[in-house]
Amino acid sequence: MWSWIARLFGSKRERDIARLRPTVEEINRIYATLRDLSDQQLRERTFALREKIQAAIAPIQKQRTETESAIQEAIRTGDIAAQVTLFEKLDQLRLERNKLLEATLAKLLPEAFAIVKETARRLTENKQLVVPATDWDYEMAQKYGHIRIENGQAIWPNVWKVRGHELEWNMIHYDVQLMGGIVLHEGKIAEMATGEGKTLVATLPAYLNGLTGLGMHIVTVNDYLAKRDAEWNGPLLAFHGLRVDCIDYYEPHSEERRKAYQADITYGTNNEFGFDYLRDNMVTSAEQMVQREHHYAIVDEVDSVLIDEARTPLIISGPVQHSDDHLYRQFKPLIDKLVNEQRRASQETLHKAKKLIAEGKTKPEEAGKLLLRIHRTTPKYRPFLKLLAEPGMMPILEKAEAFYLQDNARRMPEVDEDLLFVVDEKNHSVDFTDKGIERIAQYGEDPALFTLPDLASLLSEIEGDSTLSPAQKAEKKEALYRSYAEKAEKLHAIQQLLRAYVLYERDVDYVVMNGQVLIVDEHTGRILPGRRYSEGLHQAIEAKEGVTVEAATQTWATITLQNYFRMYHKLAGMTGTRRNRSQRVL
């Protein structure tokens, strides 16, 4: 049926190409008319496009300026109601400006793409472009080095250095690359096979959106690519007066990096863009911020950045002296003993389950109950995982789990009755059972440690005691707060130690190298130096492994790449072809 519909209406790819074809034809029509222009006349077409864009949004920009001035006045006078109204108006004006920009750029797209293509053709077929020298040309001559000023003329050669090696420009945009540029400008994803020219495609929407003066970002996955592409495409775009820079050249929070963000086209790596946003949210004044308002971005390898790495947060943290490591070392023998006892019990349970399954003289439900008991307390026990890998074992476990989870897990206590603690892998949590608390008491710890007092009722009792003076009440309250905090801290340390022992496995979730516990990325398998688990979990793992450190870390700011890029007005993606993907563009 679907094949019949595809033959009748065409495939999605065919429909997309049919939609883009008229625009490509218009680009090529304008491109043919540009051939007879001089280099200076070609450059002037860019200046004309800039003027059209600024003229289109000038009325709204004027209203924005007036509104911003009104906001400053409302802040000066302390008029909160006026501030709220004015900020809402400013947001609305921004939306109106963006809608107007989209419509304007859509009209100018064919001419803009044609100008970039014609510039690429001239650099490919000629040794140089020659225009009357301006202040811009003098500045670019200092920046790029290969541009010469002779007799009042600026000479832009078609050979320049990229990452230390001379490169001769020899690329002209094919129709398929023009289509990719249109798709990216629309904020969609262009999937291209290796060698189809993603770097060249990016010059088209970069040029068009760079003309707005609002800034556009080209995001790559590593600093080499960011610097390479900025150097490779920079002269092509700079010829038309667009400032191109790369944030990875400069130190964070430097004046040079702030200027890079002010460029028309800014290259950089995904992590640096995200970390700069976090740093800007930690400054004490707006003048210290390096980024400006987000407007448009192209993300290279978008599937890797926004899917594979999206759940790994960017974290800004720093070393702080810690005083609670002694708690993890203090309770380590207790948890070590408890976990080993439960592991021995799981070993015996596994032996019984294997025996029941081998004899075949009992119902599978009984063996399933035993397997579920192991899964509920030591899910990463290797002999247990090896048994589950055998044919027919997993269905037994799943059937038992479904049976005991029905009716709001009413019968689950039958499974947990002999366990010392219960693991919830889905929520990454571990809870002590009543038997586990009793066993800890037998080890010499106070079972009341696991019951935090009702702070509100105790404070009420102190406040209602008429025999106490105000000073005595304050002293008793302070003692109560202190006791509560100490008890909560101990309980937290015990819980985190148990999580470290049961949920985190050495050489799987983390490694120990050079006396340090290093996290392993669950998606890529790469070691993540400098990162630490939060809320004391990393210290618990260090105590478990016997690693001694002098400082812990405190998280100051965090964000995921996915959330960061959601803040852009328009976001386009570009990704290369991977295994099991069709080699196509749309």
Image (cartoon, helix red, strand yellow):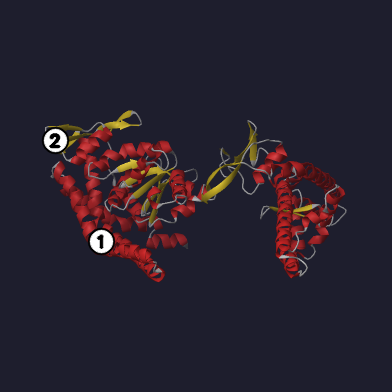
Residue at (44, 39) in percent of width and height:
222
Q: Residue furthest top?
A: 165
Q: Position of residue 4 (x, y in %)?
A: 43, 62
Q: Amino acid at mark 2?
A: Gln
Q: Amino acid at mark 1?
A: Ile
Is residue 158 or residue 147 the one in the foreground?
A: 147
Tell me: 283 left or right of 122.
right
Is residue 151 or residue 228 the one in the foreground?
A: 151
> Does label 2 or label 1 sit earlier along the sequence?
1
Tell me: 123 left or right of 413.
left
Residue at (38, 65) in percent of width and height:
87
Quickly name the residue at label 2.
153
Residue neighbourhood size for the residue with mark 1, other residues' Cα within 10 Å, grouped as few (<14), some (14–19), many (≥20): some
Q: Position of residue 369 (x, y in %)?
A: 81, 56
Residue at (77, 62) in percent of width and height:
404
The secondary structure type at the circle numbered 2 is strand
Q: Position of residue 205 (x, y in %)?
A: 31, 50
The answer to which image quadrant residue 501 occupies is: top right
Tell me: 400 left or right of 205.
right
CA gap, disc 2 and disc 1? 34 Å
Tell me: 480 left or right of 560.
right
Quickly name the residue at label 1.
57
Q: Position of residue 69 (x, y in %)?
A: 30, 62
